[in-house]
Amino acid sequence: MDVTVTDLTKSFRRQRVLDGVNLDFGGGMLGLLGPNGAGKTTLMRLLTSVLRADSGTISIGRHDLGTRAGRAAVKRMLGYLPQHLELYPDLTAREFLDYMGLLKGVDSRRERRRQADELLERMELTLVARRRLGALSGGMRRRVGIAQALMGDPRLIVVDEPTAGLDPEERMRFRVLLAGLGEQRTVVLSTHILDDVAQTCPEVAVLAAGQVVYRGTTSGLTRAGEGRTFRLRTAGPQPVDTGLSVVSAVATGDGVDYRIVAEEPPAGAEKVAPTLEDGYTALMRDARAGFAGSAADLDAQV
Ligand SMILES: Nc1ncnc2c1ncn2[C@@H]1O[C@H](COP(=O)(O)OP(=O)(O)OP(=O)(O)O)[C@@H](O)[C@H]1O
């Protein structure tokens, strides 16, 4: 399912939240990254027609979200897991999925039952299918959230921070589920957990201050940290140079291992290969300095 976003703007009161967003993506998984307040959720709400744009266009397949007919057509091929999904605590998982199927236009009761049973099985929820949603754990509720997004067999799936607050095992399970979905569909995954993107998304877009500051491969974003990522082992105090970004600090017992992104190596530091976190940090430094690299620039660093 090809999605094309052109010159999209959205303001709330006088605040310009999306400021001329251009973005293309097709099948597979796209990671959507960016700092708090960058506009990721707003973009997802526009993609899912929860909100309307002030200007610009979104086309999904051959449908234009600016038209009523386009929105109606897309609704049937879309699955959305919002950041905060309200589940009806008194419904069982199976009843909730049935209800969501109905809202998505799956008119046949038998077909809704078939889809719900298949999804409950796939999300490993069969054993709790008759339990009230209010009595499920956070991880189970999140899996019910993905299951409801998948009712109606959507070709485009939009998920907003699905693994926040999950324990490591649930998170891994969730990642595997998402990666499986991306095999046959288009999945947009917004998250702050870079590891989730590194593990599941071959492609990524980064929003900052309402604009796309990177669109390209995830490995290309990692390479943005190349030549600028250093490790500094010190028993002394934290390096306090304002010109560098400390990505992590690990206490080793006889000192601290700092991972640093900077244009120049701090004294005593050794250059190391970047991770996605380092590349993202380097990109954000560039974005703040006002010379963010385009996808073409970063991908050219092969
Ligand atoms: N309905 C709304 N009314 C007013 N302001 C809003 C509304 N929705 C979002 N905003 C503002 O728009 C900006 C972008 O918010 P958005 O939730 O899209 O960012 P985000 O990138 O998803 O952030 P986070 O990573 O913190 O979830 C924020 O400053 C937010 O306060």
Image (cartoon, rainbow, N blue to C red):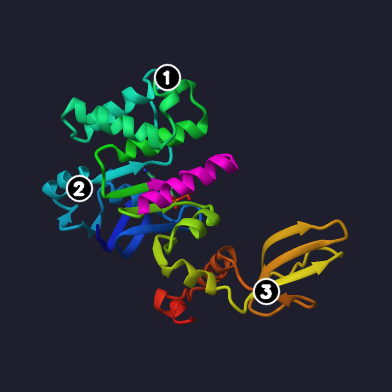
Q: Can you tell which of label 3 and label 2 is closer to the viewer?
A: 3
Residue at x-position 26% and y-position 42%: 153
Q: CA distance from mark 3 to mark 2?
A: 45 Å
Disc 2: which residue = 74
In the image, taking residue 53 as reference, residue 91 lies left or right, namely right
Check contact, mark 3 vs mark 1: CB within 8 A.
Answer: no
Q: Quadrant of residue 151?
A: top left
Residue at x-position 73% and y-position 59%: 249
Q: Nearer the viewer, residue 164 or 195?
A: 195
What number of labels is visible?
Answer: 3
Q: What kind of element bears circle 3? A: loop
Q: What kind of element bears circle 1? A: loop
Residue 157 seen anywhere in this rendered image of the structure: yes
Disc 1: which residue = 132
Q: Which residues are magenta?
A: 159-182
Q: Can you tell which of label 1 and label 2 is closer to the viewer?
A: 1
Query: Principal SS element in the magenta part?
Result: helix
In the image, taking residue 278 as reference, residue 142 lies left or right, namely left
Assess mark 1: CB under 8 A from ligand 1? Answer: no
Query: Mark 3 or 1 closer to N-term?
Result: 1
Which quadrant: the N terminus? bottom left
Say which mark, if any, is on residue 272: 3
Mark 3 packing: few (<14 Cα in 10 Å), some, or many (20+)?
A: some
Question: Identity of the amino acid at label 3?
Answer: Val
Q: CA distance from mark 3 to mark 1?
A: 50 Å
Mark 1 packing: few (<14 Cα in 10 Å), some, or many (20+)?
A: some
Question: Identity of the amino acid at label 2?
Answer: Val
Q: Residue 119, relative to residue 249: is it above or below?
A: above
Residue 14 seen anywhere in this rendered image of the structure: no
Query: Mark 1 or 2 closer to N-term?
Result: 2
Q: Quadrant of residue 201?
A: bottom left
Query: Mark 3 or 2 closer to N-term?
Result: 2
